[in-house]
Amino acid sequence: MHFADLTPYRYQWAPIRSEILNVGWLSNEHYFCHGPVDERLRAILEELVAHPVNLFRGYHVCEFCPQPVVRYDAHGHPVTSFLSGTQGNGEIRVKGLHGLTYVAPVMVHHYVTVHGYCPPQEFLDAITRAATAASPADVPEAMRPSLTVVSSRKTP
């Protein structure tokens, strides 16, 4: 599913909110920015995608990698073998400056490390600030750009 970088995020029935922006929703039918991303930033992304939100029942498979192999088990049921890291079913959310929140698929780490995707600089700045502010105790709470955990599930 493709959404251009820094366009307003939309999730199914939720209204579009201009302060929540898409990052890294790539498709093989659309051009994306290529370039180097610092190893530290790739490590931050790796940590972020390990804790996804807005999980889906299905999954998205990387459109840039070879298609997964399908084999059949002893009962004739298809079993799909995916290459490691080539599928995802959730998002990460990172708070930025001025009330912005960036939403990226968990595949963003794969896109950066394997396919050379270079996310917008303001997103890279936001993940850097969030990772930096997550540890120093002397940063006031109100001043911390932070990682958010947002769930679409309602609790009883």
Image (cartoon, helix red, strand yellow):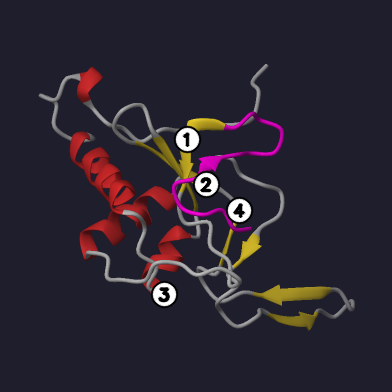
Q: Answer few, some or many: residues within 10 Å of disc 2's Cα (few below 14, many 20 plus, some between 14 and 19).
A: many
Q: Position of residue 25 (x, y in %)?
A: 53, 56
Q: Answer few, some or many: residues within 10 Å of disc 3's Cα (few below 14, many 20 plus, some between 14 and 19).
A: few
Residue beneath label 2, please?
Answer: 91
**Left/right of residue 29 with respect to residue 31 in the rendered view:** right
Where 5 falls versus 101 (above or below)?
Answer: below
Distance between the alpha carbons at the discs numbered 4 and 1:
19 Å
Distance between the alpha carbons at the discs numbered 2 and 1:
13 Å
Amino acid carrying mark 1 in the image? Ile
Q: Quadrant of residue 127?
A: top left
Q: Position of residue 1 (x, y in %)?
A: 63, 58
Q: Specify the quadrant that holds the C terminus.
A: top right
Amino acid carrying mark 3 in the image? Val
Residue beneath label 4, please?
Answer: 89
Residue at x 77%, y 83% (from the top left corner): 71
Distance between the alpha carbons at the discs numbered 3 and 2:
18 Å
Residue at x 41%, y 75% (from the top left corner): 114
**Left/right of residue 110 with respect to residue 44 in the rendered view:** right
Distance between the alpha carbons at the discs numbered 4 and 3:
18 Å
Residue beneath label 1, please?
Answer: 20
> Which one is earlier in the sequence, the residue at label 3 or at label 2?
2
- Single out the mark in the foreground, 1 or 3: 1
Distance between the alpha carbons at the discs numbered 1 and 3:
26 Å
Q: Position of residue 122 (x, y in %)?
A: 29, 47
Q: Nearer the viewer, residue 12 or 70?
A: 12
Residue at x 81%, y 79% (from the top left corner): 73
Amino acid carrying mark 4 in the image? Asn
> Which one is earlier in the sequence, the residue at label 2 or at label 1?
1
